Image: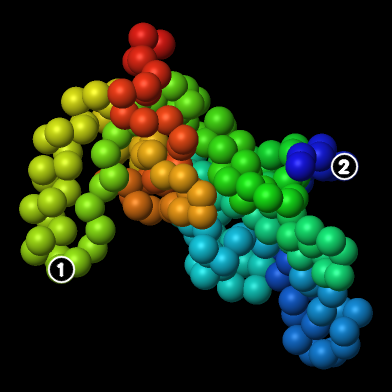
Amino acid sequence: MSATATSTMSLWALLAEHGRLHAIWRNSRQESDRLAMAGAWALAITAPGSGLFDDGEPLAGRWERCTPTVLCSDHWPEPEHLRYRGACLGCGWVSDHTHQGAGAENAAVEDAHDHTHPGWRDLPVVGAPPSMESPAAYKRLVERWRERWEPVLPAGWLEMGGPIRTHRSAPANRHVPGRAPGGGYDLATDEREETAGQLAFF
């Protein structure tokens, strides 16, 4: 389910507001203040940039390029209480759209990629990247993966933090940050490699 946000503030302003509300709650320990803090937009716990902000002092300018991330707010005890929005760590852009319910986080990730990496939806579906088993083995496996799959991606895509699309079905279809070689997202799709889109638009 998706809805349009009532107003759009920059990522930095939203994080500063969350930090302000967090400081109020930390001092008061009142439930009403905790709910206000939880309902404010903050970086989702596993999203890029999470943990790098201290009580609303966002590090604007830390990212040299547009980098996708996801904001979350919690409106417990409402049904489907978690809401998500795409955002950008580079320029501070925040999506006008909020998502809640099944697939909400993935939808917000996709909004963010529409901003940071236009054209990602037409990328070919590639093989799954290697998982970290040991640093030495991982490096070798990534080199092999790049030899096989990098030629079908736009030039410099991975170095720009570009995402990859891999075939994964529910329940393992969460878009995973940092899993693509180069640090971008691994975006799940129902498509298989042989049915992938073409690169004619590049």
How far apart marks 1 and 2 lie (CA) works out to 47 Å
Q: Quadrant of residue 136?
A: bottom left
For label 1, the residue is 134
Rate crowding at label 2 as few (under 14), some (14 to 19) or many (20 or more) other CA atoms within 10 Å. few
Q: Residue at x 62, y 67 (%)?
A: 57
Q: Nearer the viewer, mark 1 or mark 2?
A: 1
Mark 1 or mark 2, earlier in chain:
2
Rate crowding at label 1 as few (under 14), some (14 to 19) or many (20 or more) other CA atoms within 10 Å. few
Which image quarter holds the C terminus? top left
The percent coordinates of residue 48 (x first, y second) are 48, 56
Q: Quadrant of residue 143?
A: top left
* Number of marks: 2
Q: Amino acid at mark 1?
A: Ser
| 29 lies above or below 84 | below
Tag of residue 102 = none
The percent coordinates of residue 61 (x first, y second) are 50, 50
Left or right: residue 46 versus residue 192 is right
Q: Residue at x 46, y 37 (%)?
A: 189
Q: Amino acid at mark 2?
A: Thr
Left or right: residue 91 versus residue 154 is right
Which image quarter holds the N terminus? top right
| 76 lies above or below 150 | below
Q: Residue at x 79, y 58 (%)?
A: 80
Q: Secondary structure at mark 1?
A: loop
| 13 lies above or below 162 | below
Q: Residue at x 68, y 50 (%)?
A: 102
Left or right: residue 73 versus residue 109 is right
| 21 lies above or below 109 | below
For label 2, the residue is 6
Q: Is residue 17 visible?
A: no
Q: Secondary structure at mark 2?
A: loop
Q: Quadrant of residue 91?
A: top right
